[in-house]
Image (cartoon, rainbow, N blue to C red):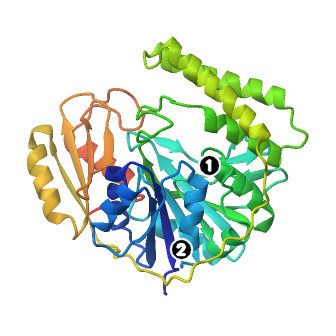
Amino acid sequence: MMQRAVSVIIVSRHRPAALLRCIVGLGQQDHRNFEVIVVADPKAAEAVSALLQPIKLVSFDQANISAARNLGLAQAAGAVVAFIDDDAVPEPSWLSRLVAPFQDHEVVAATGFVRGRNGISYQWKACEVDGLGDDHDLNILDTTLVTPTAGRAVKTQGTNCAFRAETLRQIGGFDPAYRFYLDDADLDMRLVSLGKTAVVPEAEVHHGYQASARRTANRVPLSLYDIAASTAIFLRRHAVAPDFDLALAKLSRRESTRINHHRAAGRLDADAELALLRSMTEGWKAGLACELDSLAPIVKGDVPFLAFPSLGPVAGQVLSGRSWQKSALRSAALASVGQAIVTVICLSPTARPHRMAFQPEGFWLQTGGLFGRSDRSGPKFRLIGFRKRVRSEICRISKVRPIE
C-alpha cells in the first residue's frame, strides 16, 4: 500500500544547530513518502541549504510562529501536514504512527506524546483545552479517536501534531495574532466542528527546550509579553462572557508562582522579576486592544511534492557498555549510522539519573548509573545487574524504536 504523502514543517529562528539535528532525525523515519519544509531565519536557512538535500526553504525572520507555519503550509504539497519544533527530534516511527489515523475520513487532526529534557520522562501526554485556555487531562493509553465535546477541543501539541492540509488551509491556518503561546489551542478550537482528533501515544518526539528570545535553556522566562497577549486574545476569541479582571488575576498568580520558583533557585533577581511582571501587564493590554481579523483561506502554492530521502524501515542496533567504554561505543555507533537505527546504552557504576538524547551524528545515546533511575517516577536507587538493566531499558525503548 502506498504511504500517505506528508509535508513536515519545521519553524526555526536563530537555532541552526538544533535545526540540523532535527533534520538528521527526520532522515531516520520509517515513513518514506514525505517532504520537509523549513521556515527559518537567513543564517539557519543557509546552513540547511549547505546540506544539499531536497528541502523546501522559506526565509523568514520574525518572532511569529503562527505566520511562519502558515508560510510553510502554503508550500505543502502533501495531503497531510505535520509539525515539529527545531529543538525536538522524532522517534523513527513517529511520522508513520502520527499520520496512520488519517485513513479514517473523519479525522482532521492528530497529536502524539512528548518526552522531556531527560529524553525519558514525559513532558506532554494528552488533554483537552476549553474556551478559557485551561487544560483538562485525558487518560489515553492507546491510539484513540476523540470526538470533541461542547466547549472543548483536544489539544494538539505544536511540536508533535498533524492535520489534513486542505482543511487547515480552508480555515486560514494558524492565527498570526498569536505570535507565541495558545496558537495551537486556538487552531484546535476552530477545528472542533470539522471532525475528530486522534491521540497517538506512541507517536513520540523528544523536546529539549533550547534557549530562545523568550526563555533560557533551563526555561527561565525572559518576557511574558506574548503569553499575556495571547491569553487575552484567546479569551476574546473563545470564552463565553469572559471576566477579564478575573482572568488577569489568574494569569498573574500562575506566572508569579513560576517566577518565585526560579527566584528561589537563584535564576532570577528582583529587577528581572519586576521586568517580567511589567512585560505581562503590557502584553495583556496589547491583547485586549488589538484588532481581531477574520482569517482568509491560505492559498496553496504551485509547488510540486519534494520527497525527502529517509532511511526507511531498517533494523535497530543496540550497543551497550560501561562508562569507560564510551569512546569505543561511540566509534562503533558511527560505523553503523546510515545502515541501522543505533541506540547506545552507556552506564557508570553509580546511581546517577539516566538521560537519553539523539546525537547530531545520528544515533541515540542513553547515559546514567547502573543503579540510577531512568523515569523520574522510578526509585532513585535500584540494585540490579548490568545485563538485566540493559534488557529493561531495551524493553522500554522497543515500543517506539526498532531494536536488534
Q: Residue furthest bottom?
A: 1
| Mark whose residue sits in front, 2 or 1 | 2
19 versus 296 height, above or below: above
Q: Amino acid at mark 1?
A: Ala
Dot 1: element: loop
Which one is nearer the viewer's eye here, 350 or 366? 366
Q: Is 373 located above or below residue 265 in the figure?
A: below
Residue toward you, 269 or 334:
269
In this rendering, does residue 22 appear at all? no
Spot occupied by residue 114 in the image (x, y as percentages of width and height): 49, 49
Q: Which residue is mark 1?
A: 126
299 left or right, relative to 370: right
What amino acid is at disc 2?
Answer: Gln
345 w.r.t. 29: above or below: above
Left or right: where does residue 295 sit relative to residue 198?
A: right
Residue at the spot 72% in from the left edge and 33% down from the top edge: 284
Can you see residue 14?
A: yes
**Where is residue 291 drawn, in percent x and y?**
79, 48
Q: Which quadrant holds residue 131? A: top right
Q: In percent of the image, x 62 and y 34: which residue is there? A: 225
* Total numbered badges shown on the rendered structure: 2
Q: Residues within 10 Å of mark 1 (few under 14, many from 20)?
A: many
Q: Where residue 106 appears, x then y in whole percent?
A: 72, 73
Residue at figure coordinates x 31%, y 30% from the top left? 382
Closer to the N terminus: mark 2 or mark 1?
A: 2
Can you tell which mark lies on residue 30? none
Q: Nearer the viewer, residue 75 or 35?
A: 75
Residue drawn at (27%, 42%), measured in percent from left and top?
A: 389
SS of the residue at dot 2? Answer: helix
Q: Which residue is mark 2?
A: 75
Q: Disc 2 and disc 1: Cα gap in Å?
A: 29 Å
